[in-house]
Amino acid sequence: MEYSDSVEKSAEYLRLALPLMSRQAAALHPVSYAVWYEYVAGRNAALKAQIDDVMRGGGVLDERATLELFRKHIAELDHELAQRVREGFQKVMADMSHSATQAGDHAHQFGGVLDQLSEGLAEAAPGVGLGEGIDTLREHTRTMQGAVATLKGRLDDSRREIEQLRQEVAKAREDALADVLTGLANRRGFDLALGARLAGREPGEAGPSLLIVDIDHFKRVNDSYGHLFGDKVIRAVAQILKDNVKGKDTAARYGGEEFVILLPDTPLDGARFVAEKIRATVEKCRIKRADSQETVATVTISLGAACYRGGESASDFVARADKALYTSKNRGRNRVTLDGSS
């Protein structure tokens, strides 16, 4: 979703949204705020109608309901784009149908002239000379050539319009699955990648492996240096993750200062190697002030790794990697722990 509201207008929406948010069973987090911002702004009719139904029945939105509303009405392709794509395809199809009809009419006329000329030549009908017939045939041939050329031009235009629409849809889908701050996949993008990988897994096939990454003492960084600096740290860690994934691997921002890396073709030993490499690279980083280049922070990360077990759910798979992560944090942070290690 893109917003172009002024500071004054967005402040008014904030004032209206906060009381509504506070009456719900969901926490006051960015996803919840996005839902209620859309609601009070009045631009998202489908979202508003669904929330109004809940409120009329005296209900409240819990975490699950809030997330479902966000995914359905905000994270998906926005309505205006979907409408534009739909109208664009309808226009393209209408133009192609019209052009085909015109070409068909000209072809029918051309066929009729050929039939008449054929009959005239065969029966030597009075008043129909060979030269006159050839002239008529030449004239209608030029007409037919013009109709075919017009059809080709219109089909070329339609093909370009279809390609442009396809690129719009692809770009919108890519944006919907990307984290704005880091450029990595967002949680939805990761969920889709994991679901696709598990759905395409052959029985008995090894892997995939999963890493969960958490920036150590991130709250301390935010409290000491501010949220803008915290964003800089998140982007720096994200770039290191990007530099260490390849091919079918997926790196995603899972939420806040937490990241995940899906390694489809990597066994657990290989995942440990990747994790240690990333951990060591982050440990060597020094965050500096832009003005003086003074080092103001050293950042470390903790990681948990797990390998998929045939038949388990995606949530159980993630939970095992998450448990390994918390073992790393409980043992002093800045380390890698494999699932099942004691």
Image (spheres, rainbow, N blue to C red):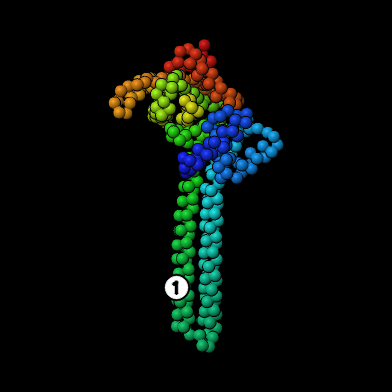
Q: Position of residue 141 (x, y in %)?
A: 46, 73
Q: Choose between 46 and 149: the one closer to the eye.
A: 46
Q: Choose between 234 and 206: the one closer to the eye.
A: 234
Q: Choose between 34 and 286: the one closer to the eye.
A: 34
Q: Position of residue 264 (x, y in %)?
A: 49, 29
Residue, x 45% and y 54% (percent of image)?
160
Residue, x 55% and y 83% (percent of image)?
123
Q: Is residue 60 found left or right of 176 in the rendered image?
A: right
Q: Is residue 275 visible?
A: no
Q: Position of residue 129 (x, y in %)?
A: 48, 85
Q: Quadrant of residue 53?
A: top right
Q: Is residue 253 above or below residue 148?
A: above
Q: Is residue 280 found left or right of 110 in the rendered image?
A: left
The residue that label 1 is drawn on is 142
Q: Position of residue 87 (x, y in %)?
A: 54, 54
Please name the amino acid that badge 1 sits on.
Answer: Arg
Q: Is residue 57 visible?
A: yes
Q: Secondary structure at mark 1?
A: helix
Q: Is residue 340 found left or right of 235 in the rendered image?
A: right
